[in-house]
Image: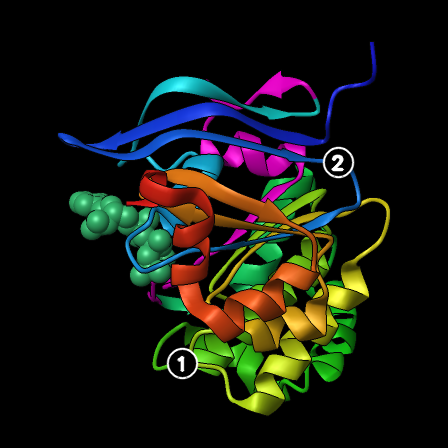
């Protein structure tokens, strides 16, 4: 038998209240691969991302989520994070009173399970990554997400990912609200991290991000199911013909 895939969703079914949002999702990511997930509004993409991280609002009613062959289902979000799972949120929440610097230090320590030492040494590493992401110094002293622009929030997420160096990254709509320069910076941040040790699931609506990130595989989610999986060439086709093209390919199943 071959070794377990790095990350696998097996016939995953998820409900929120009485509504079944994911209706049997199968997805396999081999180590080091980048997969893009697209799909119309409301198809269940963010639900999928939240469930991978263990968001309490969603009930898994069937199937499994496997990371390196191990089920994540019984684990709390912070336990998943300690295993190396990272989720960048579509709408990061504001945490008043906590500075960006303090938040980043706490986040890294929580995931690593040990102190990062004095603030000085830690911040030196942070500043280096900030420079790369073209984030200004003053950013560190601001309250977490208080009055942050869309682009700033996204840069902070990528900064977090650069510091945490996760094994599995789930990026939800990392391009939403980004101007062209910010989009490029985010993509460069992602590409900087890419390598044999990082497996990525990038959720997006836009071909432009996928042009910069160049995924190995593309999947389309519709009505809670993956209705199409293809290679990077499908990105262009999808941009040209929209989801009707997929609907024609898969017929009634896509709804
Ligand atoms: N907490 C919730 N309470 C009630 N309904 C929810 C909740 N979360 C998701 N849903 C519903 O589940 C469906 C899927 O939502 P989801 O946010 O996963 O879609 P999406 O594919 O990410 O859409 P978008 O492209 O607009 O981001 C939607 O109909 C949404 O209204
Ligand atoms: Mg969404």
Using the numbered discs, state the Cα–Cα distance from disc 1 to disc 2 in whole angstroms.
35 Å
- Pick the residue in front: 137 or 55: 55
**Image: magenta residue range:** 69-95
- The answer to whether one can see residue 144 in this image is yes
Along the polypeptide, which appears first: circle 1 or circle 2?
A: 2
In the rendered image, which residue does mark 2 sit on? 30
Residue 19 in the figure: left or right of residue 253: left
Which quadrant contains ligand 2?
bottom left
Name the residue located 85 percent from the left edge and 53 percent from the top edge.
195
Q: As drawn, which residue projects farthest toward the right? A: 196
Quadrant location of residue 147?
Answer: bottom left
Q: Quadrant of the N terminus?
A: top right
Q: Nearer the viewer, mark 1 or mark 2?
A: 2
Name the residue located 63 percent from the left edge and 87 percent from the top edge.
137
Q: Position of residue 70 (x, y in %)?
A: 63, 18
In the rendered image, which residue does mark 1 sit on? 148
Residue 122 in the figure: left or right of residue 175: right
- Pick the residue in front: 164 or 104: 164
Residue 92 is inside the magenta segment: yes
Q: Position of residue 250 (x, y in %)?
A: 43, 43
SS for callout 1: loop
Query: How many circles with numbers are drawn on the protein?
Result: 2
């Amino acid at each position: 038998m071959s070794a377990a895939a790095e990350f696998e969703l097996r016939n995953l079914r998820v409900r929120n209240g009485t509504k079944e949002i994911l209706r049997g999702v199968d997805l396999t990511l081999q180590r080091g691969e980048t997969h893009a997930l697209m799909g119309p509004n409301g198809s269940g993409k963010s639900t999928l991302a939240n469930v991978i991280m263990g968001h309490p609002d969603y009930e898994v009613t069937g199937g499994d989520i496997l990371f390196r062959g191990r089920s994540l289902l019984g684990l709390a979000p912070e336990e998943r994070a300690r295993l190396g799972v990272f989720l960048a949120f579509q709408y990061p929440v504001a945490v008043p009173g906590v500075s960006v610097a303090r938040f980043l230090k706490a986040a890294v320590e929580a995931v690593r399970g040990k102190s990062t030492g004095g603030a000085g040494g830690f911040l030196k590493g942070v500043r280096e990554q900030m420079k790369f992401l073209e984030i200004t110094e003053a950013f560190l002293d601001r309250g977490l997400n208080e009055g942050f622009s869309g682009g700033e929030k996204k840069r902070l997420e990528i900064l977090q990912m650069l510091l945490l160096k996760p094994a599995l990254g789930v990026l939800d709509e990392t391009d939403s609200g980004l101007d062209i320069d910010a989009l490029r910076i985010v993509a460069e941040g992602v590409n900087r991290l890419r390598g044999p040790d990082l497996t990525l699931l990038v959720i997006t609506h836009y071909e432009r991000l996928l042009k910069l990130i160049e995924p190995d595989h593309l999947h389309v989610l519709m009505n809670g199911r993956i209705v199409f999986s293809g290679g990077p060439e499908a990105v262009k086709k999808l941009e040209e013909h929209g989801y009707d093209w997929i609907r024609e390919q898969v017929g009634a199943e896509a709804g």
